[in-house]
Each structure stands twice: as C-alpha cells, then as structure tokens.
C-alpha cells in the first residue's frame, strides 16, 4: 500500500512520547504536516528534532492536558497557523496506575483527574477541528483507548476503565451522526493491550523483576511478546488513509490476542 498524506494536517494530542510519537513519525514519513504538544520541554525539543528530519511543516507546542484553558489555547494556535486539521488523533490520556488498588484508599480527585485527562482533550479538540473537516468533506478522528475499557482485570483501576470506556462510547456516538459521516469523516477507536514504552509502567515492571515480567507475558499474551508503539501507529496510519474509508465506528484491539472477547 502506498500511503500519501501530503498536504494533510495531522494533530496528535500527547505526540511527543510512546504511541503518540510513533504516530507523529509515521504520518511525517508519508508527507503529512504534524502538530502536537506536551508539558515536558525535553520531549518537545526531541520531537522537534525528529520531525525536522522530514520535508514537512510541523509545530510542537507547550500545553497541559489537564488545563481547559491550555487546551483551548493550543487549538486556537493550531487553527491560526494551519487553518484546518484533517486528521485528529486523541492520544493523550493515562491513569491506569494512578491511585491505589483499594478504592477506599483512593481520593475522589483521582477519579476526576483521570476522567478529565482522557475526556477533556477529546471533547475540546473535536469541537475545534471537526467543523473544518465537515466543510472540506473529509476527515479522520481516531481515539487511543485501551483493551481494559471492555475487559477489566482484578487489579484494574475502575477510574481508568471508566474513562477509557467513555472514549469508546463518544466515538461510537459520533460515528452515527449523518451530518459528519456523510461528509467524508470517520470516527474510530484503537484499544491497545500492553505496550512497552520506555520509562513507563511496563518498563518499570521489567526493571524491578525481569523474570516475573517475562513470566507474565508468557502466561497472558498468546504471541509471547509485549506490544510496541509502532504496532499501534501502523494501524492508526491505515485507519486514517483512504484505504480505510469504509471503516467507521469501530473499536480495534491491538493486544497480541490477550483479550477473550471477539
């Protein structure tokens, strides 16, 4: 397949690390202009350097996913500079390890902040960027959720599974709106399973107990390996291409066969 995103503007929330960064580099490789943001200056500078290797326009801003004011400022800056966004990747989120395994030891603000971080950017960026997609009669909105949204485990943090389930529900609802879908816009969700990202939970697990880390993988993932950010970004790239123009309202799990549901 020959992917071509030349002249397409792609906005990726949380695109300076892990899955988001992998998506940013994939779209840049195929000619898209890439825009993202982060609170981490080091990650911002690194992403600028990586995107600078491609013959595209790019913008990597400072922004805070937990601040409504900051999110709106990011969106306004993007539209002022690029006029439109063709592809929106709602990647920023997290909270799967926030709080305590006991709900009684977890304060209410953890529930609120996890929901806010996963849902507010999705709502705000969709509201800002969707009108131009409709006007131009083409657009892609993809949200990165989690397989935990539909298949929880004994140690799953309920505030995390609730927020991730909400993401899937919002995308499914939008995929039914004729005013958008009949104007060439699709809405889909990607739900990864365990993905190894440096300096995050799975990396910490491996460093603390390598033997237990590999035992867990062997016992839980039929393919006997943990996923990579590229495993996810490859599917995101396809879903946003014209090859997938009839894929709408889907939740695609990428977990090496870990899930029990179809």
Image (cartoon, grey):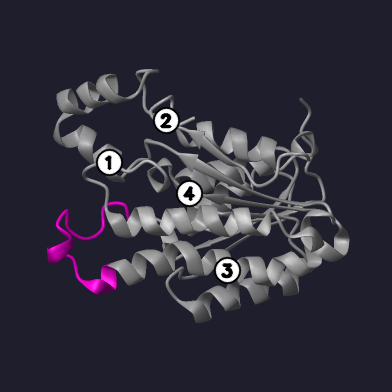
Asked whether the beta carbons under mark 4 and mark 2 sit within 8 Å of each other, the answer is no
Question: Magenta part of the protein: which range?
Answer: 95-110
Please give the residue where the numbered disc 3 appears in the rendered image: 123
Marks 4 and 2 sit apart, C-alpha to C-alpha, by 15 Å
- 97 within the magenta span: yes
Q: Given contact means CB atoms under 8 Å apart, are the residues at marks 3 and 1 in contact?
A: no
Nearer to us of marks 1 and 4 is: 1
Instruction: Pick whichever of labels 2 and 3 is earlier in the sequence.
Output: 3
Q: Where residue 136 sits in the image (x, y, percent)? A: 87, 60
Could you tell which of marks 4 and 2 lies nearer the N-terminus?
Answer: 4
Q: Is residue 126 left or right of residue 56?
A: left
Left or right of residue 138, residue 41 in this image: left
The picture quadrant where one finds residue 23 is top right
Percent position of residue 10, x then y: 69, 54
Under circle 1, the secondary element is loop
Crowd tier of the residue under label 4, counting other residues whose Cα lies within 10 Å: few below 14, some 14–19, many 20 or above = many
Task: Give me the residue at 28% from left, 44% from top.
Answer: 201
Instruction: Give left or right: position of 194 versus 18.
Output: left
Mark 3 or mark 1: name the one nearer the start of the chain: 3
- 123 or 17, which lies in front? 123
Q: In 3D space, how far apart are the residues under numbered discs 3 and 1 (Cα atoms)?
A: 28 Å
Which secondary structure dominates the residues rendered in magenta? Answer: loop
Labelled disc at residue 145 = 4
Residue displayed at 78% across by 33% down: 243
Mark positioned earlier in the residue sequence (1 or 2): 1
The quarter holding residue 236 reads top right
**Badge 1, how many Cα within 10 Å: few under 14, some, many 20+?**
few
Residue wearing tag 1: 153
Given residues 233 and 155, the one toward you in this image is: 155
Q: Residue 91: tell me if it is visible.
A: no
Neighbor class of circle 3 (other Cα within 10 Å; few <14, some 14-19, many 20+) is few
Dot 3 or dot 4: first in sequence order is: 3
């Amino acid at each position: 397949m020959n992917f071509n995103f030349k002249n397409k503007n792609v906005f990726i929330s949380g695109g300076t690390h892990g899955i988001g960064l992998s998506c940013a580099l994939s779209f840049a490789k195929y000619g898209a202009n890439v825009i993202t943001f982060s609170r981490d200056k080091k990650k911002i500078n690194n992403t600028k350097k990586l995107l600078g290797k491609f013959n595209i326009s790019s913008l990597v801003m400072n922004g805070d996913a937990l601040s409504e004011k900051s999110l709106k400022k990011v969106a306004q800056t993007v539209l002022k500079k690029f006029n439109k966004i063709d592809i929106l990747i709602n990647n920023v989120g997290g909270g799967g390890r926030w709080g305590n395994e006991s709900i009684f030891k977890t304060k209410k603000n953890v529930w609120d902040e996890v929901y806010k971080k996963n849902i507010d950017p999705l709502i705000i960026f969709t509201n800002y960027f969707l009108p131009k997609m409709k006007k131009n009669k083409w657009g892609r909105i993809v949200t990165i959720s989690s397989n935990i949204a539909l298949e929880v485990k004994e140690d799953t943090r309920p505030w995390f599974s609730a927020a991730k389930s909400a993401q899937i529900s919002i995308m499914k609802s939008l995929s039914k709106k004729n005013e958008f879908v009949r104007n060439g816009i699709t809405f889909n969700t990607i739900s990864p399973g365990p993905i190894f990202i440096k300096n995050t939970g799975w990396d910490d697990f491996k460093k603390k107990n390598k033997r237990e880390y590999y035992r867990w993988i062997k016992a839980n993932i039929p393919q006997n390996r943990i996923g990579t950010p590229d495993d996810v970004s490859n599917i995101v790239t396809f879903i946003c291409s014209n090859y997938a123009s009839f894929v709408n309202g889907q939740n695609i799990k990428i977990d090496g066969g870990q899930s029990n549901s179809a």
